[in-house]
Image: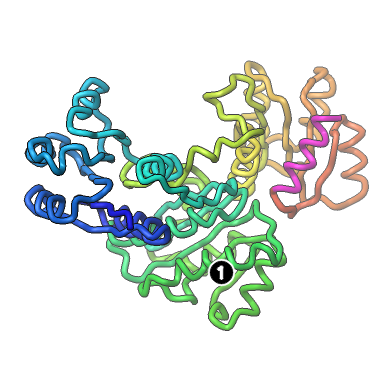
Amino acid sequence: MKKVLLIDASPMFREFLKEKLVAEQVNVEYAVGNRDAYTKMITTLPDLIIIDVESDITSLQEFLLKKHDDPNAKKIPIIISGPDIPRHHVATLAQFAVVKYFTKPIKFDIFFESIGKILKLNFSLDTTPSIMEMHVNGLIVFTEIALGLNREKLYLLKYRLQELLDKNKINEPKIIIMMTNIKLTFIDGSNLEVLIDNILEDKRIKPKNVKILSFDTFTKELVKGHPLYKDIEVSDNMNDIINSMVDASQGESINEIVSERILSVDDHSTQESSIEMRFMNDNAEGVISEQDSGNVLKVAIVDDDVVIRRLLEKAFAGVSAKSVLFSNGVDFMHAIEDQEFDLVILDIYIPDINGFDILRTLQRDNFKAPILIYSQATMRDAVVKSLSLGAKGYLIKPQKADVIVQKAMEVLHS
């Protein structure tokens, strides 16, 4: 049986790593501090040593020197995860049999690929495209999931959640799981159960304090029919979910919470984690990142509802489009004087200038980008008037975000 010695690992890093290694019949030993690490190394003689450095890489010097001087341990390969350090410092570690240095936060798919090469094991990793982010606002933890349910990340989410609760000292958390861009079938049922079970595994989390934002029929039916999930609410209305959780005495409005905390990548919290919730395989074929291409689709979203703006921004990000958000017509009309857009999503009823006047002005000025109306106006006259003023499509609120993106793609391709 292969043996791995894990040194100074944080609880989240340690537990997730152990879970994956044990599943592959690898024996895992823990050590804390240089003295404990050296003792366990010479008694177990592991096939691999993994060291998790919190902040100061120089703290390893004593252990590395003793290992180098021990003829039985000298050649044991080491993988280190730690802070960003100069490249020439990384190069000096090679003399101590350090074969890989991972700068935190770690992308685990690449991490396990390196472990597999050393141990000559083929780790079975789920490659389902999936984006997961976690944010904290007071006692509320927002968990965003897009594209799909990746089993590796579902297990990782459990430890990330525990880390957030511990760090923020939250004893009675409220969890909002946002899955507005995911459509599931019975094939995904086991993964959906893994998601919910991993969240409920932390005893601080009560089912009644878990809410799921989803438009998906299967998700609603599975949760409703599951005896252990009967207190979990599934809703397609963000306002209703937040209203049921926000403490009005704290003076926070729904708009403030949505605009400041929801549907945006919290880079600060990501950097404070030892593990990256995004993997390298998230940049799958057909998904373009801004780093890979300067030709990113640019969408103007004009709507006075902050929830809709953020939901659409997230949905278009899923197809690598960059969104520019406008809460009123005046700001949008000023913006098009010096910005070009590939597509406009426009509400009819917005402050300052209504959608019809905007359409009329854009038609007069021979505006080139296609315009898709997304509005609560259901009267036939409104639809006909919009299309006669140059709109390329008309969708009545509310719709699933992916329906709007799909319609937008149809308009662009036509």
Residue 107: percent from left, percent from top: 42, 41
244 or 353: nearer the eye? 244
Residue drawn at (19%, 24%), measured in percent from left and top?
92
Residue drawn at (79%, 32%), measured in percent from left and top?
371
The answer to whether residue 59 is visible is: yes
Q: Is residue 75 left or right of residue 126?
A: left
Residue at the far bottom: name it. 227
Q: How is the image coloured?
A: rainbow
Q: Identify the image quadrant of residue 52.
A: top left
The residue range painted magenta reads: 402-414
Residue 266: percent from left, percent from top: 42, 43
Quarter in which the C terminus is drawn: top right
Around disc 1, counting alpha carbons within 10 Å, would you say few (fewer than 14), some (14 to 19), or many (20 or more)? some
Q: Is residue 406 magenta?
A: yes
Tag 1 secondary structure: helix
How many discs mark residues in the rendered view?
1
Residue type (three-letter) at the residue carrying disc 1:
Glu
Quarter in which the N terminus is drawn: bottom left
Q: Which residue is mark 1?
A: 193
Q: Is residue 184 magenta?
A: no
The answer to whether residue 306 is visible is: no
Residue 151: percent from left, percent from top: 53, 57
171 or 75: nearer the eye? 75
Is 258 located above or below residue 287 in the figure?
Answer: below
321 or 252: nearer the eye? 321
Is 37 located above or below residue 323 in the figure?
Answer: below
Is 390 located above or below residue 281 in the figure?
Answer: above
285 or 119: nearer the eye? 119
Residue drawn at (36%, 75%), measured in percent from left and top?
203
Residue drawn at (80%, 30%), measured in percent from left and top?
412
Q: Is residue 46 left or right of residue 159?
A: left
